Image (spheres, rainbow, N blue to C red):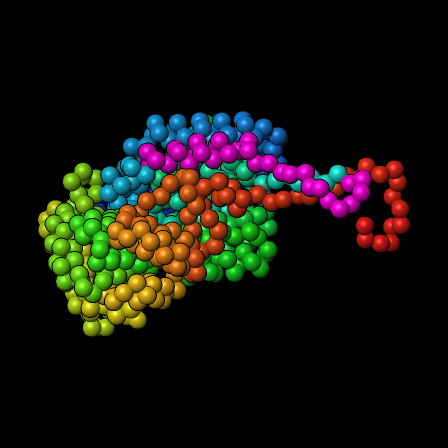
Amino acid sequence: MTERLEQFRNVVGGKRVESAGGQWIDSHDPYAGSAWAQVPRCTPDDVEAAVTAARNAFESPEWRDITPSARGKLLWKVADLIERDAERLARLEVRDNGKLFAEMHGQLRYIPEWYRYFGGLADKIEGSVIPTDKAQIFNYTLREPLGVVAAITPWNSPLLLLTWKLAAALAAGNTVVIKPSEHASVSTLAFAELFEEAGFPPGVVNTVTGFGAEIGDALVTHPKVAKVAFTGGDATGASVAAKAGEHIKHVSLELGGKSANIVFDDAPIDDAVRGAIAGIFAASGQTCIAGSRLLVQRSIQDEFVEKLVAFARSAKLGNPMDEDTNVGPVTTRQQLDTVLKYIDIGRSEGATCALGGGRPEGTELGDGWFVEPTIFTGVDNDMRIAQEEIFGPVLSVIPFDDEADALKKANQIAYGLAAGVWTQSMPRAIRMAARLEAGTVWVNTYRAVSYTSPFGGYKRSGLGRESGQKAIEEYLQTKSVWISCADGFSNPFVLR
Ligand code: NDP
């Protein structure tokens, strides 16, 4: 007899709900390679209910008239609840996406800081008094929320990437409908319940699970959705933005990347090796900021690659829940096929596979969707494995001659999410940081983020910024108020 899978429900208007059609989607455990839970397979009718609940909450006195300071305190309260439940939520994420417990638990323990930071900003959203050139006019601005925000998130770090939207959107006074990835929805459903417990009015935070292809359009084009905040692949992002554009909605996009991690010959080599590993094998390469193009100065290439291969070879593959595991499975069966396809492409393009290059064997890996940490050398910057986002543990090593060559190769790409520079020369670090076409540049470190620092993409990696003080602007609009202090209203036929 097959075991009944645990079922998780959506949160809509403060209630736990199944889908209108009564159907479910299986959620898979990438380590076991089998289904472990179910989430509702929503329909456009469910989207209608969730957006309506969010709009009603937006217009309700409980939310509309709450003071900004009280709104901030609700965010602080939810931060405490997330801290309380960090371990439970991290375990749900690992069951769903197969990433290391150490990574997801670290994220969950850090996530509360976004709610504290943006909670603190809630009562610092200020308009201004404008000294216009018009006599006897008192002109001031109000900074107002947009309304209902649709937050669409991917599977790789569901709660962290949701938080980057949600904390800012709520601090600004919006209400939200969250559409998590069909592959990793469970943690979002458990997370959404905490907002009611924290005292948010029902309907301020809602969820709809299901297939993007079935419910995405209904959400993105809904007349009551004011803004779409999207994180995901660039192709999906482009189509979501086009649909939102037809309906004149605000849009922000956090998209994919193919980031250059650049090692100069004066770099602290052992640190740079660790930085290269962090860039590609952490999270099995399934991060938007993966440093999947490793640019190494030709003069140190052989020594560097030798050390890199030795380090990567020592990484332990295994159960993502175990503390000593370094590399877990990839999240979906489909992603496994995609990564293996790119490994074939790399070989057929003439690159040399210096490490890995297939599925690993080992009883402790069971039926999990593992890919060996894979390093290609002899990669030309025009090859597909150097230009296309693989989203797996596959590294392309590209040699360069000097600083100008490094910059040219680093910028010769459609994406612009992040870049790493390894050098002991501060002037070079500053020159490179100024000229790299990327929203984030790390020098002698990699994969660092903070609630205080803006994050987002150049070029095809996105529009808008998350985190940092300015991120709240993405969820506000400005109203200009004109009050006449004059005695009368003269000639009505001319612009005043
Ligand atoms: P996708 O683009 O496939 O999906 C992202 C989200 O969009 C999912 O919730 C998906 O739902 C939804 N979606 C799919 N089709 C539609 C549609 N027509 N309308 C509305 N929503 C839709 O990305 P992945 O989930 O595969 O995530 C991996 C990608 O995300 C990578 O490219 C990665 O680089 C990028 N990413 C970017 C980050 C950043 O901050 N810049 C951070 C992390 C990831 P469903 O799953 O049901 O299809």
Could you tell me if residue 275 is visible in this image?
yes
Residue at the spot x=78%, y=45% of the render?
Answer: 134
Residue at the spot x=80%, y=43% of the render?
Answer: 135
> Up-down: is 46 above or below 384?
above
Residue at the spot x=71%, y=42% of the render?
Answer: 131
- Please check the rendered image and state whether residue 487 is part of the magenta-colored stretch, yes or no: no
Could you tell me if residue 207 is visible in this image?
no
Residues 53 and 381: in front is 381
- Please check the rendered image and state whether residue 119 is part of the magenta-colored stretch, yes or no: yes
Residue at the spot x=66%, y=43% of the render?
Answer: 479
What x and y, as percent, mark residue 173? 55, 36
Q: Which residues are magenta?
A: 108-137
- The quarter in which the N terminus is drawn is top left
What x and y, as percent, mark residue 53? 55, 39
Residue 313 in the figure: left or right of residue 36: left
What x and y, as percent, mark residue 424? 25, 51
